[in-house]
Image (spheres, rainbow, N blue to C red):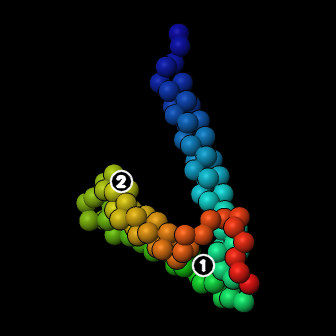
Amino acid sequence: MIDWHNRTLIAGAAAVLIAGFGIGFFLSGGGFLLYAFATELYPSAGRATGFGFLVGASRLGAVAGPLLAGILLTADRNAGDVMLSLVPLIAIALIAALFLSGGRHVGQAIAQ
């Protein structure tokens, strides 16, 4: 007799591990890409200051994100509500990145 319940649990655990690996890979990759973009975005004279601000802002987000999620989850919200609360923050980050880049693209030479 085949125990379908245990097979389902094993398949579910494998799916969670694969998804977790993928999410971690792309989140880390996105952070490294952001660091590479920062070196192109800031002119040489202010690159260290700009890069330091970028790292500090990312650390602030790393602290504030779980706090916001915890507050929402303890206020009887579900995981979908937590994810939807990120949409305005992502939109603000996108607008700020487009505004601060001044229309420059990665790979374009920036005046020193």
Q: Amino acid at mark 2?
A: Ala
From the top left corner, tell me how far across and down residue 86 is, in percent. 39, 62
Q: Secondary structure at mark 2?
A: helix
Residue 10 position (above or below residue 103): above
Residue 79 circle label: 2
Using a 10 Å C-alpha cutoff, classify the residue at mark 2 as few (fewer than 14 neighbours), some (14 to 19) or many (20 or more). Answer: few
Residue 85 position (above or below residue 100): above
From the top left corner, tell me how far across and down residue 93 is, in percent. 46, 69
The numbered mark, 1 or 2, whose residue comes first in the sequence reads 1
Q: Quadrant of the C terminus?
A: bottom right
Using a 10 Å C-alpha cutoff, classify the residue at mark 1 as few (fewer than 14 neighbours), some (14 to 19) or many (20 or more). Answer: some
Report the Cα–Cα distance between label 1 and label 2.
28 Å
**Residue 56 seen anywhere in this rendered image of the structure:** yes
Residue 77 position (above or below residue 67): above
Residue visible at 66% across and 80% down in the picture? 42
Q: Amino acid at mark 1?
A: Leu
Q: Nearer the viewer, residue 82 or 48?
A: 48
Residue 7: quarter of image:
top right
Q: Are marks 1 and 2 in contact (CB under 8 Å)?
A: no
Which residue carries the number 1 mark? 54
